[in-house]
Image: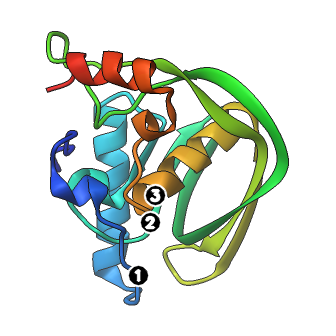
C-alpha cells in the first residue's frame, strides 16, 4: 500500500508531469491509488499525494467513481461556493484525520482528459464532485486547499498540521 504524503513533502508543491506511458504500470498505479484512497477513507487522491508526480487522479464521490489521466479543468459556473473541505495530505497532528475549513470553489466544472487506456474522458460536475475535481486538479499544480483559504483560516489549519 502506498503511503499518503503530508504537507511539508516537496512533491505536494511541485507541478506534476503529464502521463506519457499507457500500459500495465499505469493501470497498476491507478489501482494502487484507488486502494490508498479507500484505505484512508477519502473521496479523491492525486498522484503527488502518493509521491508520484504524474498528472492523474482517482475519485469516488456522490455515486461517481473513476480516474482521469492528464486532466484539464474548466469552470462552467463561476459562482463561488463556500463549503467544508479537507485533505488526506493535511492531517491533524493530534488525530491524523484531515483538517477541514470552509474553502471557496466554483459551483460547476468540466474535466477533460483520458482514461487508463488513453481514451478521451469528459466529466461535468457540480456540488461535492465539482469540489473534488478542483481539489485534485489543484494537487497536480502543486496547490493545496489551504492556499485558497483566508490568511487567518490557513494559519489555523497549519498550526494543527504536522
Q: How many marks?
A: 3
Asked if the residue under mark 3 is in contact with the one under mark 2, i.e. CB atoms within 8 Å, the reply is: yes
Residue positioned 23% across, 53% down in the render: 50
Quadrant of image for the C terminus: top left
Front residue (pair 139, 152): 152
Vertically, is 92 above or below 68?
above
Secondary structure of the residue carrying tag 3 is strand
Residue 7 image point, x, y percent:
22, 40
Tell me the residue that label 2 is attached to. Answer: 56
Front residue (pair 77, 123): 77
Secondary structure of the residue carrying tag 1 is loop
Vertically, is 19 above or below 87?
below
Secondary structure of the residue carrying tag 2 is strand
Q: Earlier in the sequence, mark 1 or mark 2?
A: 1
Residue positioned 52% across, 59% down in the render: 67
Is there any visible trace of residue 159 in the rendered image?
Answer: yes
Cα–Cα span, label 2 and label 3: 4 Å
Left of 18 or right of it: where is 9?
Answer: left
Tell me the residue that label 3 is attached to. Answer: 57
Q: Dividing the picture into quarters, in which one does residue 42 lie?
A: top left
Residue positioned 32% across, 80% down in the render: 24
Residue 2 image point, x, y percent:
17, 50
Left of 89 or right of it: where is 6?
Answer: left
Vertically, is 102 above or below 1?
above
Tell me the residue that label 1 is attached to. Answer: 19
Q: Bin the neighbour count of mark 3 within 10 Å (Cα to Cα): few under 14, some 14-19, many 20 and up.
A: many
Vertically, is 96 above or below 77?
above
Front residue (pair 151, 25): 151
Q: Bin the neighbour count of mark 2 within 10 Å (Cα to Cα): few under 14, some 14-19, many 20 and up.
A: many
Left of 127 or right of it: where is 119?
Answer: left
Q: Bin the neighbour count of mark 1 within 10 Å (Cα to Cα): few under 14, some 14-19, many 20 and up.
A: some
Asked if the residue under mark 2 is in contact with the one under mark 1, i.e. CB atoms within 8 Å, the reply is: yes
Amino acid at each position: 500500500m502506498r503511503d499518503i504524503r503530508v504537507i511539508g513533502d516537496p512533491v505536494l508543491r511541485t507541478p506534476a508531469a503529464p502521463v506519457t506511458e499507457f500500459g500495465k504500470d499505469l493501470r497498476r498505479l491507478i489501482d494502487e491509488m484507488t486502494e490508498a484512497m479507500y484505505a484512508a477513507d477519502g473521496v479523491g487522491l492525486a498522484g503527488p499525494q502518493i509521491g508520484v508526480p504524474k498528472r492523474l487522479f482517482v475519485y469516488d464521490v456522490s455515486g461517481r467513481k473513476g480516474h482521469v489521466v492528464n486532466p484539464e479543468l474548466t469552470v462552467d459556473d463561476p459562482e463561488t461556493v463556500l463549503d467544508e473541505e479537507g485533505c488526506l495530505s493535511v492531517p491533524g497532528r493530534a488525530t491524523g484525520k484531515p483538517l477541514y475549513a470552509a474553502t471557496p470553489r466554483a459551483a460547476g466544472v468540466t474535466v477533460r482528459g483520458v482514461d487508463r487506456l488513453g481514451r478521451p474522458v469528459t466529466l461535468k460536475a457540480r456540488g461535492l464532485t465539482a469540489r473534488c475535481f478542483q481539489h485534485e486538479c489543484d494537487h497536480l499544480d502543486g496547490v493545496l486547499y489551504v492556499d485558497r483559504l483566508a490568511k487567518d483560516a490557513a494559519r489555523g489549519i497549519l498550526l494543527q498540521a504536522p
